[in-house]
Amino acid sequence: MTAPALELRGVRKRFGKTEIIRGVDLAIARGERHAIIGPNGAGKSTLFNLASGRFPVSEGRILLDGADVTRLAPHQINRRGLSRSFQVTNIFPNLSVFENLRCAALWSLGYRYAFWRALSSLADARSRAEDVMARIGLARRRDTLAGVLSYAEQRALEIGVTIAGGAQVILLDEPTAGMNRSEAAAAVTLIRKVTEGRTLVMVEHDMGVVFDLADRVSVLVYGEVIASDAPAAIRANPQVQEAYLGTAAHA
């Protein structure tokens, strides 16, 4: 049997005496698009920080393609095939769109730190960056500094950065936050396209985005998963409606 792309087993996280994540068990299949939803303060971003190695777990295990990565540093987990975005856009503002994507591609292509190597000579890194840039719709902004892009373009660039390194498991933290309706719709189209054949896990508050994009939805409330099912079943779940969706679930 094929191991899940990402699995959390009995994961707990405490800050001092306060337990934020309380025994989460979650298995995400390869190629699945999985959304994690829940009210503010439920622990969604903390869960992402645990899965990506940014926070150490207090108890439990985290497995990536069946391998235990519980105690690995974030860069080690990234090099094993997991990449993530953040709620606040996390790019190099003083580098161009192309330079951001090329930087993201370097390590996965086998390049290490070397002061004597000219980046302009790395044809494969250039090709990878150009390909991702076209896929995220920013080819015309190739030489534009990332810091002067529009907000929606910066979010698209960050998504590009997460896939430029070749990661097969992508974690997106509120990818459409702060976007208007048309920008969010464009972001959904982009995410669907660039994560084709990869495993996507996202935290998202926009229920339209969740139900449009996700194959499966998990609901986190007070650090516990209270339901994990197909979007239609989550929409109809009375416990979920009471805990999070409210009257919006009937819309």
Image (cartoon, rainbow, N blue to C red):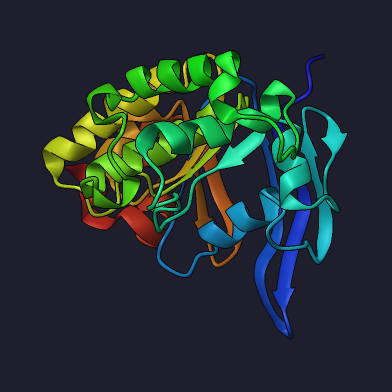
Which percent across, then down, holds residue 109?
68, 22
Which residue lies at the image location 37% right of the left edge and 40% below the top edge?
A: 96
Which residue lies at the image location 25% right of the left edge and 31% below the top edge?
A: 141
Q: Nearer the viewer, residue 112 or 51?
A: 112
| Residue 88 visible in image | yes
Q: Is residue 199 left or right of residue 101?
A: right
Q: Is residue 113 left or right of residue 95?
A: right
Which percent across, then down, holds residue 138?
28, 27
Above-or-below relation of 148 to 18:
above
Above-or-below relation of 200 to 181:
above
**Viewport quadrant of the N terminus:** top right
Q: Nearer the viewer, residue 244 or 20?
A: 20
| Residue 229 visible in image | no
Q: Quadrant of residue 77?
A: top right
Which percent across, then down, holds residue 108?
68, 26
Q: Is residue 123 left or right of residue 16?
A: left
Which percent across, then down, holds residue 105?
58, 28
Q: Nearer the viewer, residue 193 or 142?
A: 142
Q: Quadrant of residue 192?
A: top left
